[in-house]
Amino acid sequence: MEQYQTKPLASLSLDLDNKWTYLKTHGDPDWDSFPSYLDLVVPRVLEFLSDRKLHITVFVVGQDAVIEKNKEPLLWIAEAGHEIGNHSFHHEPWLHLYTPEELDEELEHSENAIFEATGQRTVGFRGPGFSLSDQVLKALIRRGYEYDCTTFPTFLGPLARAYYLTTSKLSPEQKKERKSLFGTWRNGLQSNQPYSWSTGAERLIEIPVTTMPIFKIPIHASYLLYLGKFSKTLAKMYFWKTLKMCWAFRVQPSFLLHPLDFLGAEDDRDLSFFPAMDQPAEKKIQLLSEIVGMFCEHFKVVTLREHAKSLSDSSIADRSVSTATIGISGSLAEAN
């Protein structure tokens, strides 16, 4: 990794999916009481980031921001200097089924709730379950968003969906709603490189959740922690190889965290269906520390808004918004 004179840019983000969102996706009946672990996980995340002097983007679900017990932990995030992004209000990974009117209401409701809880106006969005469509993109552009970071260029989406659906308690109707969860194999044809969605006159920067160049295998923290169950050395070698490939293909990686990366089996037995939630938190956080340390050693890590701003004046490729409906952005030649 010596072809750069200085560290290339990279971004780090966390999807603050609360306990109820996992139960909702899984089909557990008690999700609508909105159980929360934010008071437990947020201090762990903030301590982890503070120790490494990192500022990241945290995507908040609007529903959490209107629940009184969650407001203080969300405010802690903003007060620590982290960017707050919009992760929808209801956390339903079928935004492609929403009408334009429903999308505007969903986004506005979440924006207002997050602002009231944290004092931040959101300018970045990530769809729950990587849910995206041309209507979602048009709504984001219409509402003045600076960037989206929903695309997840991997061929393994259908396998992840199959795992969730086979381990869930969902009815046939609920499974049908979730039939696009994590995307199709065609998502693997999407680019790892940032680009912009264009409606002609308007543009929205897209920063994909990075996967291994060429092979398009996930590298987000939850995936690495699952590999670490079997071999910590393998997980670290796999990530190191990906970082080297990102350098080789000049990909500015965007690395994704989730709350369950900081929680273990001793913290919550209800979430045992999630990969690596049978491991102790201390073991997971130790491996996560080593992984993030590797990431920071070789890249300058910033928030997604900073990452997007660095791209706003560059000659990144444009993609037509209409390609979002079929899940393809760019050709195979552009797929790194």
Image: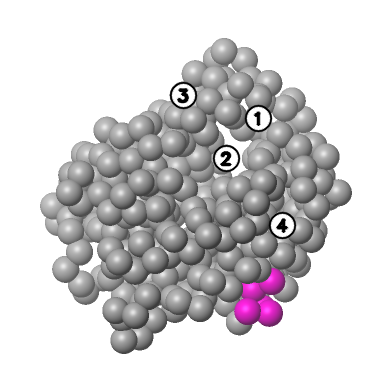
Closest to the camera, between mark 3 and mark 2, is 3
Sequence-earlier tag: 3 or 1 = 1
Q: Is residue 88 above or below residue 325?
A: below
Magenta highlight on residue 38:
no
Give the numbered dot on residue 90: 2
Q: In the rendered structure, which disc, 1 or 4, sits on the residue that comes first in sequence?
A: 1
Q: Are marks 1 and 4 in contact (CB under 8 Å)?
A: no
- Please name the residue shown 54% across and 20% down the image: 175
The residues colored magenta run: 48-52
| Total marks in image | 4
Residue 179's tag is 3
Kindly state the secondary structure of the residue where label 4 is placed: helix
Q: Are marks 1 and 2 in contact (CB under 8 Å)?
A: no
| Picture quadrant of residue 308 | bottom left
Q: CA distance from mark 4 to mark 2?
A: 29 Å
- For residue 26, the mark is 1
Q: Is residue 322 above or below residue 119?
A: above
Q: Amino acid at mark 2?
A: His
Question: In this figure, which residue is indicated by the disc labeled 4?
Answer: 284
| Crowd class of label 2 (few under 14; some 14 to 19; many from 20; radius 10 Å) | some
Please name the amino acid that badge 1 sits on: His
Q: Residue at x 69, y 71 (%)?
A: 48
Q: Secondary structure at mark 2?
A: loop
Name of the residue lying farthest toward the bottom: 5
Q: Earlier in the sequence, mark 3 or mark 2?
A: 2
Choose the circle earlier in sequence order: 4 or 2: 2
Q: Identify the mark nearer the N-term, 1 or 2.
A: 1
- The chief SS type of the magenta part is helix
Q: Is residue 200 or residue 1 the one in the foreground?
A: 1
Rounded to the nearest whole Å, what is the CA distance between mark 1 and mark 4?
22 Å
